[in-house]
Image (tube, rainbow, N blue to C red):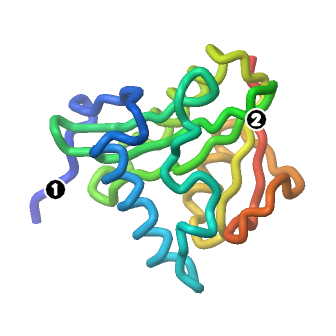
Amino acid sequence: MADRSPPAEGLICSEVDPRSDDARHALREYYAELARRFPRGFDVTLSRDPDAADMIRPRGAFFLARSGAVTLGCVGLNGHGGRWAEVKRLWVAPSARGLGLARRLMLAVEQAAAELGVETLRLDTNSALPEAAALYRNTGWREIARFNDDPYAEMFFEKRLG
């Protein structure tokens, strides 16, 4: 069977408006995956900022990963106007997994955070996403106590920049 993964060298990560059609497509794919993987499903209306509207400069940023016209991943930075910000909505399409795309997206969001004067990043995840927790642990994030009231969050992480 032929490999249908996009070539790693053709992948581009760029900052976009989270309200764009491509960003909304990526978010819909992300939410659909959570609904499939979470034991009790996923209801986006219970989530803060489901449209990623707060992930726009000067408070935040939103990134898409693409190969040509195909959107393969996303991640957002939700700034709170202070020294810490939250990483949200990290998603990579199943066809692009294993290419290091999640790491590239996380690096882009960390660079944007540093540009915005953020000193500490936080994020949460669910135990149904063990690959996400492994990524965070392997890239310098440390587990911390709960910092939000997200009903789907079970693990919490923090990373200091600089």
Amino acid type, mark 1: Asp
Q: For numbered disc 1, what is the local secondary structure?
A: loop
Q: Position of residue 8 (x, y in %)?
A: 27, 36
Residue positioned 30% across, 29% down in the render: 12
Res 131 quadrant in image: bottom right
Q: Position of residue 133 (x, y in %)?
A: 65, 56
Residue positioned 53% across, 67% down in the render: 44
Q: For numbered disc 2, what is the local secondary structure?
A: strand
- Left or right: 6, with 151 as reference point: left
Q: Position of residue 7 (x, y in %)?
A: 21, 39
Q: Position of residue 107 (x, y in %)?
A: 54, 29
The residue carrying mark 1 is 3
Q: Are marks 1 and 2 in contact (CB under 8 Å)?
A: no
Disc on the earlier residue, 1 or 2: 1
The label on residue 113 is: none
In the depicted structure, whether residue 45 falls above or below residue 22: below
> Residue 12 versus residue 134: which sits nearer the camera?
12
> Residue 65 versus residue 27: which sits nearer the camera?
27
Q: Quadrant of the N terminus?
A: bottom left
> Residue 50 versus residue 157: which sits nearer the camera?
50
The residue carrying mark 2 is 159
Amino acid type, mark 2: Lys
- Left or right: 30, with 38 as reference point: left
Residue positioned 43% across, 60% down in the render: 30
